[in-house]
Amino acid sequence: MKFKGKLVQWDDVKGFGFIQPLGQQTQVFVHIKSFKHQPRRPQLQDIITFTLTKDNQGRETAHQAKIINAKAKTHLSKKTPSQGKFSFLLILCLIASLAMALYHDLLPSYFPLIYLLMSTITFIAYGLDKSAARKGRWRTKESTLQLMALLGGWPGALLAQQYLRHKSQKLSFRMILICMIIINICVFVWLISPYGQALFPFEKGAFAPFITNIY
């Protein structure tokens, strides 16, 4: 027998919550594994259809859960083209800034590799976390993802949000990510400034061997 209810509690990190059947005061436990082939993860106030089953301890839990308004909310929550363009523009600005800094010998030649490596690791981490979320497995901490972005992986984070559609709807996460990007950019600007150059000097002419090795 199928029931219909509203998702009144949901912990997206742990992947479980409670459904309140319509017209009732009781609540039914639901796990992310109960949602099969859904276009997005559950959100508070979602209307859900489900059947009842019992867990190993004999407690009633939701089974075969389906978000009946998922398509409508997915359409409303999609990223606008301007948001995607802004992310690409920001990454292009970083690439151009790195190229100019290398050309003027303001940074070591290996410095762009840090961004490339951290962005790759961050993108993979987002992908693994999304896979874990779908399968109800252990998730990567949000603080870990934010730390990766702070250490230079924010281009990978932006690309993951754009292409993997992961961590792109939670406003608090996005705001913290913006702060991580701003801090990283500020540190980058400081490093290529006279103050940063004076405090962290490196061997000048490092760019020339880098070009030689490429060609």
Image (cartoon, rainbow, N blue to C red):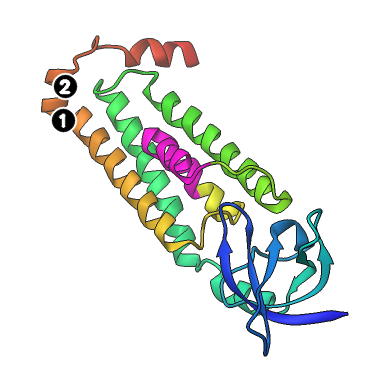
Location of the N terminus (image quadrant): bottom right
Instruction: Evaluate whether residue 50 shows in this view.
Output: yes
Image: magenta residue range: 141-158
Image position of 69 (left or right of 181):
right
Near-viewer residue (23 or 175): 23
Q: Which mark is residue 197?
A: 2
Q: Is residue 151 magenta?
A: yes
Near-viewer residue (109 or 187): 187
Q: Is residue 178 magenta?
A: no
The amino acid sitting under disc 1 is: Ser
Residue beneath the point at 41% across and 37% down: 147
Question: Could you give the CA–CA distance between mark 1 and mark 2, rounded to whole angstroms?
Answer: 6 Å
* Residue 178 spot, x, y in % from top left: 35, 52
* Residue 46 spot, x, y in % from top left: 62, 76
The relative height of residue 40 versus residue 215 in the rendered view (above or below) is: below
Near-viewer residue (46 or 5): 5
Residue beneath the point at 59% across and 52% down: 14
* Tag 1 and tag 2, C-beta contact below 8 Å: yes
Q: Main secondary structure of the magenta part?
A: helix
Q: Which mark is residue 193?
A: 1
Q: Which mark is residue 145?
A: none
Quarter occupied by residue 20: bottom right
